[in-house]
């Protein structure tokens, strides 16, 4: 897991990454990150995307959806997410794949990336081209 230090007080934002390899089965973009047991995530895995809320270790699946056949976690794939108030949207290659209101989501918190589900030990996860913009609520 990687966390962007200094982003803890952020409230509304749009951010994303470009994958540089596909060795992880699941890639999660974390938002409103307060601790390793308190955040909201867009979870991307083969064939599916999910919005999951973690609140003091209680894991709640908010919503899930199937990805299109051509949407895979391969080198060059762009994963992104937006957070405005309690609304979360997850994107793959610029297409909004899922969105939902997330009750009891933290009102602020940082951004991060988490990778899970490696087939073999000593595998790596790499991403680049991270981008973050503030959401304007006017």
Image (spheres, helix red, strand yellow):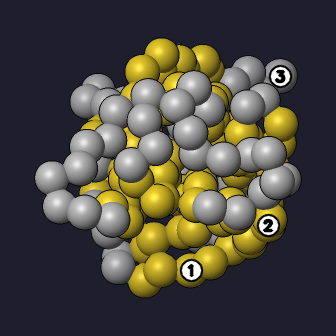
Please tell me whether mark 3 or mark 1 is closer to you in this view: 1
Disc 1 designates what residue? 60
Q: Earlier in the sequence, mark 2 or mark 3?
A: 2
Tell which circle, 1 or 2, labels the residue nearer the N-terminal end.
1
Task: Give the residue pinned by disc 2.
Answer: 65
15 lies left or right of 63? left
Outermost residue, left direction?
Answer: 122
Q: Quadrant of the C terminus?
A: top right
Quarter of the figure with residue 79: top right
Q: Are marks 1 and 2 in contact (CB under 8 Å)?
A: no
Residue at the image position 45 percent from the left and 71 percent from the top: 54
Where is residue 48 drawn, in percent x and y?
A: 70, 64
User: Who's the residue at 69% across and 25% down the image?
Assistant: 135
* Image height of 106 relative to 70, above or below: below
Query: Percent x, y for residue 88?
Result: 70, 51
Give the Cα distance between marks 2 and 3: 30 Å
Q: Residue at x 25, y 30 (%)?
A: 5
Mark 3–mark 1 CB contact (< 8 Å): no
Apparent side of residue 65 relative to residue 55 in the rendered image (left or right):
right
Whether residue 130 is visible to the viewer of this picture, yes or no, is: yes
Residue identifier under label 3: 138
Answer left or right for 49 relative to 60. Answer: right
71 and 105: which is toward the camera: 71
Q: Would you call the spot at circle 3 few (<14 residues within 10 Å), some (14-19), or many (20 or more)? A: few
Give the structural element (helix, strand or loop) at label 3.
loop
């Amino acid at each position: 897991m990687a966390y962007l230090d200094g982003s803890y007080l952020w409230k509304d934002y749009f951010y994303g990454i470009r994958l540089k390899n596909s060795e992880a089965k699941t890639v999660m973009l974390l938002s409103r990150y307060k601790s390793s047991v308190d955040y909201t995530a867009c979870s991307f895995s083969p064939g599916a995307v999910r919005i999951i809320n973690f609140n003091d270790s209680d894991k709640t699946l908010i919503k899930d959806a199937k990805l299109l056949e051509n949407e895979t976690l391969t080198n060059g794939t762009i994963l992104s997410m937006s957070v405005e108030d309690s609304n979360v949207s997850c994107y793959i290659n610029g297409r909004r794949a899922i969105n939902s209101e997330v009750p009891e989501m933290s009102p602020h918190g940082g951004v991060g990336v988490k990778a899970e589900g490696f087939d073999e030990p000593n595998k790596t996860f790499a991403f680049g081209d991270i981008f973050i913009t503030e959401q304007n609520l006017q």
